Image (spheres, rainbow, N blue to C red):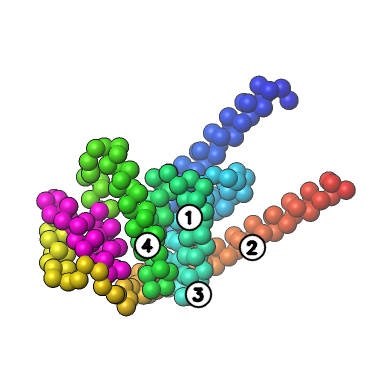
Amino acid sequence: MTSLSIKNAAVATDSTFQEKLDKAIELHKEGNGGNISAIQEAYRLLEQLRHDHPGHPLADAYHGAVMNLIARYSTKTFERLKYSNRGLKLLDEAVAADPNNPKIRLLRGKVAYAVPEKHFHRTATAIEDYKFLIDHSMRENGALTEGDSKLVYELGEAYYRIGRNQDAANCWRKLENDPEYGQTAKQKLQSVAGRPAVEEVQSDGLGMSDFMGVIALATGKALLKWVKHEEKKARKKRKKKERRRRKRKH
């Protein structure tokens, strides 16, 4: 194969990868909205994409985020913990590989914010990622934009969750005149008025049942069964491929 052919093949591969990743991103968005079939397809697509094209942190991050969608709809505590931890591990690895990527930081930050603090202890991770995203937006735009309001509000909630009342108040104070969050921010400021700047918090009050959300039990079981079936198929496929590779070597 000539150098030009190799270059053209690489460009075609990159194009195919990006098309599949874009599709997975759209499916993840639909899955966030409760579309179970989109979660299934995103999981399948990202599993294969990462196998065929390893070393892409953004693909790893989306796969981790999809695993946490699976955890949200799982019906057993053990399974929710299992898929949440697997997803968070992938997200941590993606951030370590590409720490300045705002898309990856947003994915991890949102997952870390959503999981129960008393089970996962990831509120500090959410704070780290949200601060990165807000600082990044400030550098890019010179000021907070309309789209940053939710991040600032949730950053305040994250601080409050771990007893950092003064830091929470500083976030909510920035939103007092915000058209969407202004009223809620004022109420939150009243709730921390007079409280210590930092206090010990026993529990965030959010349990695994809350994290799971209001879902149909049968739907959660069906999704988990499907995921396990896909994982089993993928393992068999990898083993078969490895056996062929070994035969070729001998």
Q: Residue 245: in sight, yes or no?
A: yes
Q: CA distance from mark 4 to mark 3?
A: 23 Å
Where is residue 84 shown, x and y percent of the image?
47, 65
Q: Which residue is mark 1?
A: 91
Q: Which residue is mark 2?
A: 232
Amino acid type of the residue tagged 2 in the rendering: Lys
The answer to whether residue 110 is magenta is no
Q: Earlier in the sequence, mark 2 or mark 3?
A: 3
Q: Which one is in front in this view, the residue at disc 4 or the one at disc 1?
A: 4
Q: Which one is in front in this view, the residue at disc 2 or the one at disc 3?
A: 3
Q: Which residue is mark 3?
A: 78
Mark 2 nearby-residue class (10 Å; few <14, some 14–19, many ≥20): few
Amino acid type of the residue tagged 3 in the rendering: Phe
Instruction: Examine the image and state in which quarter residue 205 appears.
Output: bottom left
Amino acid type of the residue tagged 1 in the rendering: Leu
In the rendered image of this protein, does residue 226 appear above or below residue 147?
below
Where is residue 8 shown, x and y percent of the image?
62, 26
